[in-house]
Amino acid sequence: MITCKKQNFLLIFLLFFCNTLFARDDDSPWQHALTLFDAPKYPADFYAFDYVNTNAPKGGHLRLAIHGTFDSLNAYNGKGVAPSSLSSIAKYGFSELNETLMVSSASANGPMDEQYAAYGLIAESVKFSKKNQQLAFKLNPKATFNDNHPITSRDVIFSFNTLTALPYGRFSGMDQHIERIETPAANQVVFKLKPPYPLMLPLHLAELPVLPEHFWQNHDFHKTSLLAPLSSGPYQINRIIPGKLIEMERVRDYWGKDLPVNRGKHNFDKISLHFYRDLHIAFESFKSGNTDAWFEVQSKNWATGYHGEAINNGLIIRREIPHTMSYGARAYVFNIRKPYLQDRRVREAISLMFDWNWISRAIFHNAYTRTQSYFPHIPLTSPSNGEAQLLQPFSATLPPALFTQPFTFPTTTGDGNIKEHQKQALSLLRQAGWELQQDKLVNTLTKQPMKLVFIHENDSQFERIVFPLIQNLKKIGIAVTLQRMDLAQYYQRLKHHEFDMVQYIYPLPQFPGEELLDFFHSASVKHQDGRSLMGLEDPAVDALIDQIIAATGKHQLETATSALNRVLLWQHYGILNWHGNSHRIAWWHHLKHPESFPPYGFSLNTWWAEQNNRESQ
């Protein structure tokens, strides 16, 4: 700010001029959408998203099967096992309990045909001033929680303070980028951003779920609880059976039902989520007609498991729906906290034993593609000049080939013969101080054999998939114990880092941000939240994450993200698995859907029940 001690004309003029510019920027019109890179697809007067059926009838009962269990209904505090922490995508209803300021492709209710844009929900409009480093939201005066209590700026501030204070989660630590929060009116919230702030910060703030302050004043937010929280969305919980069932009913007077982002959605009167610890039993329940839709995650089952009278007679419909989205990077993750996994050569040797070509043909029926990077749409090329500059300070600890070559994945003939890879692996292990003695890999100094513990949740199908890797590791003398456990024990083992290897899906978008701190930054290594699985303490990774968060432009963000991807690959911190390019969905014929499917997501929130199957209207 310009001061004017001498009150001379020039300074008075400059002060007036600067304040006029700021005022003009502040007085810019409120917008219906927030975008970071391009103009929004939908105009201010749009009626509904293109892929919905606005004439879809209301009514009926949707029953879904969820693989897993739960012991908490708080989706935000990270305590216990909430339904939102389970990997199944069939969590429609529960995911929409708490509305967000705006909806984006990262939201349960957001646009699935556009990325990196947010549209009004609780906030009916937004104003982003880069010049003044501030982001303002104007709340919809009709917005209420489902006890008819109005949603105000106090609830927004309470939610922000509560979620950013947690030691984990996507909003953790976000407050460090906020200088202050102002509330010029009960329906307005202004975030004063602290430069330099992450490029994605405005969009992440727009995705903030708004929690009811008056409800949580009387309940402990930080405890595990099966108390149904007060919601603000189209559904509310009306019945639970702990660990087995969550039943939700549609809120008839839901305040946001006529908003453009909601038209054509939330058509079922009732939604029941049935939880099954065994995936096979859950599938059989679907085929028997006890649940209405099934999201197939097993390629073998998709190829061979659909038979019976209902399927043969067309009562069950199957379809593969192409998409261009990313569910994240699935990987076999190494726990670098273990001394014998801290050597990159050991991790690379283990990676060489993953025979993707054989697994793809023999187990997956060639239904999947090998995942090539931790972030979607990053090509495997030699590093650009910009990447090389970011990586150069760490050249002493990074593989020299990283600076000149693209990363390549080992390939085989797919017939199970991996003798060449065995030779390469044993050579790397000898360099790292390990020798093959009487079919056991032994450390030359400690004389101790290498033994790995690979944990997984109670899933017999996963054992079939990982077994070939375990057998190949046995060929080079590495003994692997595969420990199968129930979901509660599994999450405890993750949180306390009691494993050597585990499979995990990193939910990483094309343009990442603060979530990288939880997954890969050294500051999160000791957190017991089940996110810092690798336990990385790599200065290069830390520096690149800092660059990503501090990026001020799209090119800068892409360069730093590509460099981070390169380091994660060349350091062999995990073994990237596979991904599909379509949703495999089966459903009973009384369920109906819009004509077109969007490219960046899938949700049953646009589906409806056939007229004669609806239970209520």
Image: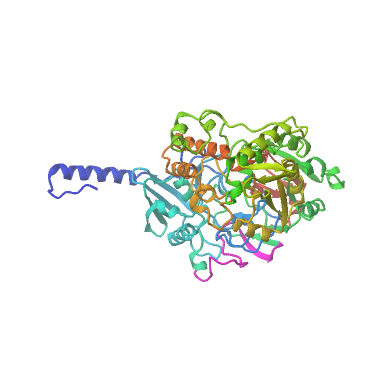
Can residue 242 be seen at all in this image of the molecule?
yes
Picture colour scheme: rainbow
Which of 160/49 is in front? 160
Quick one: which residue is furthest to the bottom in this view?
Answer: 218
Residue 359: x and y in percent read 74, 38
Residue at position x 55%, y 42% in the image: 509
Horizontally, residue 302 falls left or right of residue 388, namely right
Which of 268/395 is in front? 395
Residue at position x 19%, y 49% in the image: 3
Q: Is residue 386 above or below residue 122?
A: above
Q: Is residue 303 above or below residue 134?
A: above
Magenta stretch secondary structure, dominant: loop
- Look at the image and say whether residue 445 sits in the magenta stretch: no
Horizontally, residue 395 falls left or right of residue 301, namely left
Residue 393: x and y in percent read 43, 37
Residue 86: x and y in percent read 65, 54
Can residue 93 be seen at all in this image of the molecule?
no
Q: Which residues are magenta?
A: 217-244
Count of numbered marks? 0
Which of 320/334 is in front? 334
Q: Quadrant of residue 291?
A: bottom right
Horizontally, residue 299 falls left or right of residue 143, namely right
- Look at the image and say whether residue 240 sits in the magenta stretch: yes
Q: Quadrant of the C terminus?
A: bottom right
Q: Quadrant of residue 416?
A: top right
Quick one: which residue is furthest to the right in this view?
Answer: 309
Residue 494: x and y in percent read 62, 56
